[in-house]
Image (cartoon, helix red, strand yellow):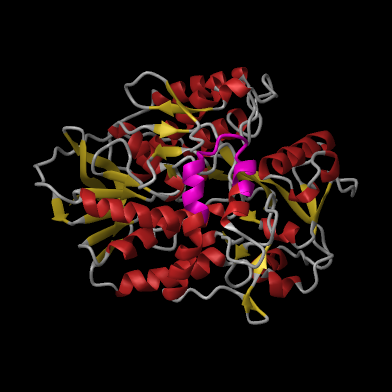
């Protein structure tokens, strides 16, 4: 068993993992583990940008109000306050690291996205914000002597002793390696790949959530998964390309098969309504027309190749010209509001284990994330987790026990279960079927060293947790929609807590 000791272990190389590692590099030795390459993350492929109150006429209070409105009554307000107040300083930190946000007329250009009351979205290279920001931070990470990068290392399980986390066990080329550290930070990203249709890259399989759950950490809000409304429809190809919300912010219009602009009949904000409203409206129009997509009409946007170069290039590869053609689009799994429960400093309910970014649930997003708050959350709470990790990195390290391993096959079967039974529309019948089908697949479990099947085992854990939480919440709120309970119920204005081996628990919404 190969092993090495570090002061800090960061698992995941998205924006949260990169920013946390850079914050920690002057405080001790850091190991940064990622199961793919450093670029293989949701953050790297993020298009729209970062929401922050940095523009004229904007304020943290206004950003706060928009965030709370999108969250459908389930946002923890003290966490939202930290996000909107500390966000502008974290943006300045990125600029100090060399990130160059797009400028227009000598000023930072701010775009508009759905449910924002003002232009406040900073972006890089038009529609390649994630790539621009992450590339700059990756360069800094590689240049740092204090950060050791381990690409291609799949974390199998956390190393636990007497209820405390002391690192993780990773698999690479059928060889296990133990990474010991008194402070471990999960920054593993989201769960989109557990669904058959998703905008997420292949690495987004919910590993961090499964790791934390098996270790006994609390999870919160697992029923809330955001489906992005406008993902390019490509026929049989299940790898979907996201059409940023900023395209609609610049004037693009959704149309059904008959060419009608339909969003006005679903919400007063029309095409810029909250994501859950737009996604379900598209889903309804698709069912009514018996077609697998609707259209996004962006022909009114001038010089789309300059404003959206990445999207324009991808559409051109498919023979579509934004200035001429309507783009076929449909909803796909995009972001999970739930995850590993943390306090405002990234601390989980397990000593020595912290979490930040999409894998964590701080209560910021409530039942529905406001567009472009995710990248901001990654740096605001990544910095907070790093400072808390410094305090946690103390004490004598024991001789930890190596965890046992289990695996599961059938990744595609799992994706079909989640898409059809735990998707945009849910019911008791559908969710119960999902749990039964997961149980049937679970009988195929076996011990082994196959990274792909270990990854599928994590996906099965995450789908089961989402289905259980969705079955419990007998109402519709934000991104969670029940066909059998279509209305919001004030008695359900609370968080659902799931924890391995513990009874079901609820947590009140923190109003400050």
Whether residue 376 can be seen here = yes
Establish if 41 lies above or below 507: below
The stretch drawn in magenta includes residue 71: yes
Residue 38 point in image, percent of width and height = 39, 62
The residue shown at (50%, 26%) is: 469
Establish if 423 lies above or below 278: above
Quadrant of the rendered structure where residue 145 is?
Answer: bottom left
Residue 173 point in image, percent of width and height = 27, 53
- Label total for image: 0
User: What type of secondary structure mainly makes up the magenta span?
Assistant: helix
The residue shown at (15%, 50%) is: 394
The stretch drawn in magenta includes residue 208: no
The residue shown at (18%, 57%) is: 6
Depth check: give the residue in front, 134 or 283.
Answer: 134
Quadrant of the rendered structure where residue 360 is?
Answer: top left
Residue 188 point in image, percent of width and height = 39, 49
Q: What range of the chain is rendered magenta?
A: 65-84
């Amino acid at each position: 068993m190969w092993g090495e000791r570090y002061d800090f272990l960061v698992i995941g190389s998205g924006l949260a993992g990169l920013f946390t590692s850079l914050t920690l590099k002057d405080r001790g030795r850091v190991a940064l583990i990622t199961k793919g390459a450093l670029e293989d993350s949701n953050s790297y492929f993020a298009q729209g940008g970062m929401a922050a109150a940095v523009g004229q006429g904007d304020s943290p209070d206004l950003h706060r109000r928009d965030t709370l409105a999108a969250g459908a009554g389930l946002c923890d307000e003290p966490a939202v306050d930290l996000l909107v107040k500390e966000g502008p300083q974290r943006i300045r930190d990125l600029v100090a690291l060399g990130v160059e946000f797009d400028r227009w007329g000598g000023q930072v250009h701010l775009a508009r996205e759905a449910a924002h009351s003002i232009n406040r979205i900073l972006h890089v290279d038009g529609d390649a914000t994630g790539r621009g920001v992450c590339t700059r931070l990756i360069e800094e990470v590689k240049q740092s002597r204090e950060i050791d990068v381990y690409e291609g290392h799949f974390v199998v399980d956390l190393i636990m002793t007497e209820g405390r986390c002391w690192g993780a066990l990773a698999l690479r080329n059928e060889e296990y390696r133990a990474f010991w550290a008194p402070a471990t930070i999960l920054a593993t990203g989201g769960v989109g790949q557990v669904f058959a249709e998703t905008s997420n890259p292949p690495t987004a399989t919910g590993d961090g959530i499964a790791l934390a759950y098996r270790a006994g950490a609390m999870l919160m809000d697992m029923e809330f998964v955001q489906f992005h409304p406008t993902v390019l429809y490509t026929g049989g190809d299940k790898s979907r390309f996201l059409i940023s919300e900023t395209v609609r912010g610049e004037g693009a219009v959704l149309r059904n098969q008959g060419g009608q602009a339909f969003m006005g009949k679903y919400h007063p904000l029309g095409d810029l309504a909250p994501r859950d409203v737009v996604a379900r409206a598209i889903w309804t129009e698709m069912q009514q027309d018996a077609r697998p997509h609707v259209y996004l009409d962006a022909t009114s946007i001038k010089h789309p190749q300059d404003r959206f170069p990445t999207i324009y290039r991808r559409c051109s590869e498919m023979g579509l010209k934004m200035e001429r053609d309507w783009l076929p689009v449909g909803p796909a799994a995009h972001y999970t509001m739930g995850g590993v429960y943390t306090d405002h400093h990234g601390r989980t309910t397990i000593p020595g284990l912290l979490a930040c970014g999409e894998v964590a649930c701080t209560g910021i997003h409530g039942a529905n994330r406001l567009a472009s708050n995710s990248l901001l959350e990654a740096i605001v709470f990544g910095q907070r987790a790093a400072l808390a990790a410094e305090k946690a990195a103390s004490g004598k390290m024991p001789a930890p026990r190596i965890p046992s391993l289990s695996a599961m096959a059938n990744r595609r079967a799992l994706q079909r279960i989640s898409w059809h039974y735990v998707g945009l529309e849910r019911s008791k019948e559908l969710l119960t079927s999902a749990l039964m089908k997961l149980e049937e697949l679970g009988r195929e479990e076996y011990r082994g060293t196959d990274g792909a099947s270990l990854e599928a085992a994590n996906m099965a854990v995450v789908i089961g947790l989402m289905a259980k939480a969705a079955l419990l919440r007998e109402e519709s709120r934000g991104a969670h929609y029940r066909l059998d309970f279509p209305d919001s119920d004030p008695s359900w204005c609370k968080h659902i807590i799931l924890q391995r081996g513990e009874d079901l628990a609820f947590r009140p919404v923190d109003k400050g």
